[in-house]
Image (cartoon, coloured by chain):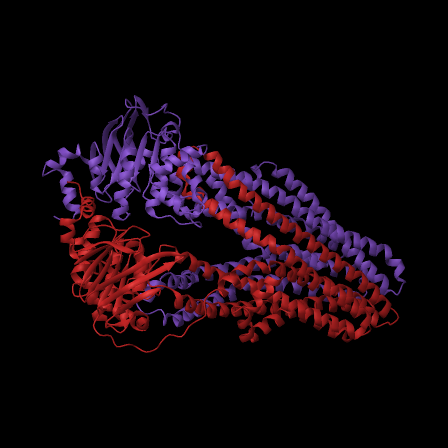
Amino acid sequence: MIDKRLFKLNGIISRLFTLTIMTGIQGLAILIQGITLASAIVNCWQGKPIKNALIAICIFAIAFIIRQLLVVIKNQFMSAYADNAVEIFRRQLLAKYTALGSTLTVEQGTGNAVTMLGVGLDNVKNYFQLLLIKLFDLAIIPWIILLYIFYIKWEQGLFLLLIFPVIIMFFIILGLAAQSKADAEFANFKNLNNRFVDALRGLPTLKQLGLADIYGGEIYNISEDYRKTTMRTLRIAMTSTFALDFFTTLSIAVVAVFLGFDLLDGHMTLFPALATLILAPEYFLPLRNFSDDYHATLNGKNALTDVLEMIDQPEMINKNSLNLESWSPNSQLSFKNINFSYDTQNVLKDITTSIHGYQKIAIVGESGSGKSTLLNLIAGFLQPTSGSIRINEQSLDHLAQKDWQKQFFYMPQQPYIFHDTLKHNISFYAPDATDEAIKKAVIQAGLSDLVSELKLGLETVIGESGRQVSGGQAQRIALARLLLDSKRKILLFDEPTAHLDIETEYDLKQTMTPIMSSRLVFFATHRLHWLDQMDYVLVMQKGEIVEVGEPRTLISNKNSRLNQLRYHLRGEK
Amino acid sequence: MTNLKALLKNDRWIVPFLKNQHKGLLWSIILSFMTIFAAAGLMFISGYLISRAAQRPDNILLIYVPIVLTRGFGIARPIFRYAQRLVSHNWVLQFVSESRRRLYERVASSASKIRSKLQTGEVLSLLADDLDQLQNLYLRTLFPLGAGLVLYLVVIIGIGIFSWQFAIWWLIMLTVIMIIVPVISLLTNRSRIQRQKHLQAKLYADATDAILGLQDWISSGRQDDLVAHQGRAMKELARVKNKSMQFGWWRDFLIQLLALLLVITTLFWANSVFKNNQMAINYIAAFTLAILPLVESFTAVNQGVSEASFYEDSITRLNALPELVDKEPLEQQINGTDLKLINVTFSYDHKTVIDNLSLTVQKGEKIALLGRSGSGKTTLLKLITGDIKPDLGSITIGEQPINKLQNQLSKIVAILDQQSYLFDTTILNNVKMGNINASDDQVKQAINQAGLQPLIDSLPMGYQTQMQEAGKRFSGGEQQRFALARVLLQDSPIVILDEPTVSLDPKTEHEVLSKIFEVLKNRTIIWVTHHLTGIESVDHVYFLKNGQFSLADTPKQLKQNSEHFKQLLAMDDFQ
């Protein structure tokens, strides 16, 4: 229930210590509350005037209020700690995310990484805030009560003590049975639930096929199957709570009946019997509260484990080995025998090449030939498995270097558009840019039409839930980002125009060409018309560079690999 | 408050279902009440039992009935609770089945055949989530509330039997606990919940920005900004949530205090009523002890009601769905399959998207449609398929207006788009959806024609392979071929190709395109494409700009006469 790493957290020990003391006081208050209520009732039962019981009633009320007050105080106390802990985790997580960079999304998946920041941290908060309280209640309160019952009548105490593990055992055994049943039906569950969403998402296709109308009945049948499967599982899943419920209430009934017999035989008087009866439900209450949130506890614990594991992930080392002020016409980058494997598959083989100054290098090849992988290696998103990299006589293990990242601008097929204003999207790389500079970048990147079309102009919110921009506009926004950050002298393009319509591609090329001058450019593409802007071309095939040269020279040679690729892409043999 | 009233008044999703399925609802509430009743009964009767036993009656038979009742209530409570949970879940899932069908029918009646750029899928998942949300409205709010109100009645009547004055005292207290406090907390929490939902959405957007834009945050060296940016929404959300929690904690505290008041006053009352009677004196313990188990129900009602406004958005969204409209059942006779658009104009949001456009596509003719995004391509296709109606002008197929052909359109027009959906069933069933009356042999022939035979032969399960598992294994090109097989089987004279190869690599694109034009050679084709690969296969090329054709001719003529076309053509290769 408790991860050992929990105890290493800052300030947790003193928090839990205070929590223990407060829970202890609460336990005593519950005890006093039960005893005084019993004595007040007994007083009345004996036919004595009620004013004799006034003190007991007052103490009862005070104990009752203290107990309820402590509930609120404990919640506040742990909630403050939870907020604090979650904030620390959030900072650590984001720091780790940025340190891991794109390897994060490759290994964790985008969805998981987003979930951990949202729902994951929420569950962790719950864990600290609610579940630790319930856990400590369970660990302290029943035993204070039990001690008292033992003191009054050891037989009843023994009974309540022995029934406790029995209840937990049944709860666990039936819980496991339910789990295995749920596991067995899991595939079925997921299938049925998905099919509803499946039908909704496939609705345009159903309409196209003229099947949309008759599918409604199918949806109903699927949902009914889902209901039946769910009910089968629930019938078993609920037995574990049933068992808990059954044993606790029955125990109270059994205690009451036994107390009745003891009273009948004169072994006992009413006061201790009544006190025992009032305290018996309190004895089981923490267990019932805890089991109600059992699944939330598991979620919270798992979320905490995930977060702690993520924070402990190893980072890339030697990120500061490169010392590079700025990439100049004399700078040089060379690869020697670079290999890269992914899942034991050799994606890049024996890459050796050397680049200098403001050359424009095209990387061409069929899809799957390793163009993007090579580009990712240059950007430092991936580390080579073996081989050596040199920049200006400095030897490096990889290019995830702080000084290297300041030099280049990477343009993917679909640049990410933040959910923010157009202005902030454009000035993302240069948040301090003046309005003048932004206007200039807008014109240069060919965004003037978009800006004048929008009522709010640069202040329009774009991205996911704002105004959607087209693929071509997204590319232009990325170009504007680059234009505002003039220090970056290296451009990495990964198929920036392949998915655009041809007229947009044509227009974009006119915009991009002047931007590429006096910069080092790596351009991975299968749109070969870009070659007219390039100084060199690297032809790739199955992870290897199979040909290097100037585009014009290669094209004039009928048997060059570049020409083979051209025929191939045109669908000719 | 007025909003809430309006919401309930115009509701078509919650209230009608409650009326139709009142039996299960009734049982659920009764069982829920019985659970609380048994819990209170157990304490009542055992309090009586031990008081009576303490008087040491001569004969055990005198306390026999309370003993049996004690055991009975002890067993009854968990059984009622178990039954209640099963009944209520079953009922709620019935609601889900019924609502899913309704939701589907409503969405289906207004859905379009042409996929839009906007993520309709997201909207639909949102609606599906709304239904899941409503389950909680029943389980957490309506059932406890119903049971609470029954308890309210029974308790007051029960006490009224002994004393009407004291029953009035309970009436006042229970009205405060079960009605006044819940209503106050509903109203107080409402704006807080709206704010909380808004912040939660913002937090999700921020997290997405953080992860999907991670590379940009790192490259730009703005890691610290990322941490700060992310933190603001989270802090604000924590603040709002804490406020509602604080409210909840103190509200529960108040309810406990009121319960305390009830315990003490009941003790005094019981003392005054029963103290002079040797037998009745045992009821003092019984009445006093029975109050504490009721608190559970008090807090459940309060929590449920204050959460209720969580579901407001979901209900509003569902109610906003259009009602079903009856369609013309008759099939129209068509005269040939020529497609004619005459002076068609369509505006959206004060912007003319299609501007006085005319177009004739004869039987068997193949045309290509090009244009920048926003030029009106998608709108034109929606007009042709009758998804939307033109403001001016007419659109006919075989001399029949398109809106009269909606019932039989799938027999006349087939559509192959960029993400033709493959359903979670077998390959055979998926293709068969093109024509559900086709024989298995016809289906297999269509699959073969689409060039998928080698693939089928390589699968251990062959035609019976499940798509869902296989979907991941099948490449984009293979998926489009399956969709093509479906279109082949549909056997309609006109085929619309809506960028069917946009996500494929050039080599596969060539293969798929040549397959498409090979197997559809006898049909009319309207092909929306984003570049000029395969353009020589069509008879006419149309360039759409601002809702009009800026360029239209045969590919051969365009190649000779149009500079623009030549420039674009050069983009497909390096010479």
Residue at the spot 37% in from the left edge and 38% down from the top edge: A442
Report the quarter where the C terminus of chain B lies.
top left
Residue B376 in the figure: left or right of residue A548: right
Single out the residue that lies furthest toward the left: A558
Residue at the spot 36% in from the left edge and 34% down from the top edge: A483
Numbered marks: total: 0
How far from the left and from the top, in percent, is residue A336? Answer: 25, 28
* Chain that is coloured purple in the picture: A
Report which quarter residue A191 is drawn in.
bottom left
Report the quarter where the N terminus of chain B lies.
bottom right
Report which quarter residue A536 is drawn in.
top left
Q: Tell me if residue B397 comes above or below residue B211 in the rendering.
A: below
Can residue A53 be seen here? The reply is yes
Report which quarter residue B395 is drawn in.
bottom left
Q: Nearer the viewer, residue B55 or B290?
A: B290
Residue A402 in the figure: left or right of residue A4: left
Residue at the spot 57% in from the left edge and 43% down from the top edge: B235
Q: Nearer the viewer, residue B316 or B45?
A: B316
How far from the left and from the top, in percent, is residue B40? Answer: 70, 66
Single out the residue that lies furthest toward the bottom: B330
The colour assigned to chain B within the rendered structure:
red
How far from the left and from the top, in percent, is residue A45? Answer: 85, 65
Q: Tell me if residue A449 comes above or below residue B157 in the rendering.
A: above
Can residue B420 be seen here? The reply is no
How far from the left and from the top, in percent, is residue B126? Answer: 46, 58
